[in-house]
Image (tube, rainbow, N blue to C red):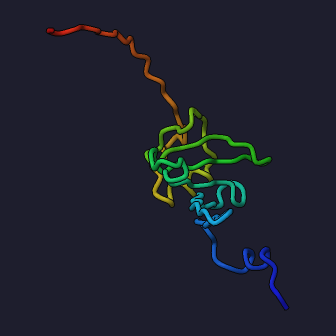
Amino acid sequence: MMRELIDLIADGPVLDAVLVAPHAEASLLLEGKTIDGRFKNGIRIDRPTHLGDGSGDVHAHVFGRHGDQVVAVNLDGSGSHGTKGRLSKEDAAALSAQGFKIRSDRVVEWVVVDFDWTLLNESFGG
């Protein structure tokens, strides 16, 4: 009996990298791994490689009951993707167990620092 792909996913190891090869061109798809927090698979931890250019930090997306994103948090505990909020005790514990530095009050903050930019445009010599 031939096994279906869904059976392999349910019974097999977790995939965090998939090679996609349409028309003989290959692309490596690297996605995050999901962990349980307040809800089953309610947290997705992304590596910076998912941005395409390798920039960014390891961060986690925390999802609510209906799959909506509650907050995104960097490994150092700061907010990511412009989000801020308060983690549940279960989500905070799950992230801490993965090495995230979560504050004792479980608050994730995103702070925008405003700069007063001045453009200096000078020409030199001849």
Residue 11 to residue 91: above or below: below
| Residue 11 lies in quadrant | bottom right
Q: Is residue 13 above or below residue 60?
A: below
In-front residue for pair 124/103: 124
In this rendering, would 101 be left or right of 94?
left
Q: Quadrant of the C terminus?
A: top left
Residue at image point 52% right, 40% down:
105
In front of the other: 124 or 51: 124
Q: 56 or 80, which is in the foreground?
A: 56
Judging depth in this view, the residue of 106 and 60 nearest the camera is 60
The residue at the point 44 percent across, 45 percent down is 55
Return the residue found at the far bottom. 1
Please give the name of the residue rendered at 60% of the width and 35% of the height, measured from the top-left corner: 85
Marks counted in the figure total 0
Question: Residue lying farthest right?
Answer: 1
The residue at 40%/16% (across/down) is 115
State whether residue 35 is above or below residue 7.
Answer: above
Where residue 95 appears, x then y in whole percent? 54, 54
Q: Residue furthest front?
A: 126
* Residue 80 pos. (x, y %): 53, 39
Whole-percent x and y of residue 46? 55, 53
| Quadrant showing the N terminus | bottom right
Indicate left or right for 89 with 39 as reference. Answer: left
Compared to residue 119, the image places residue 92 above or below, namely: below
Residue 13, how many percent across, how many down? 64, 77
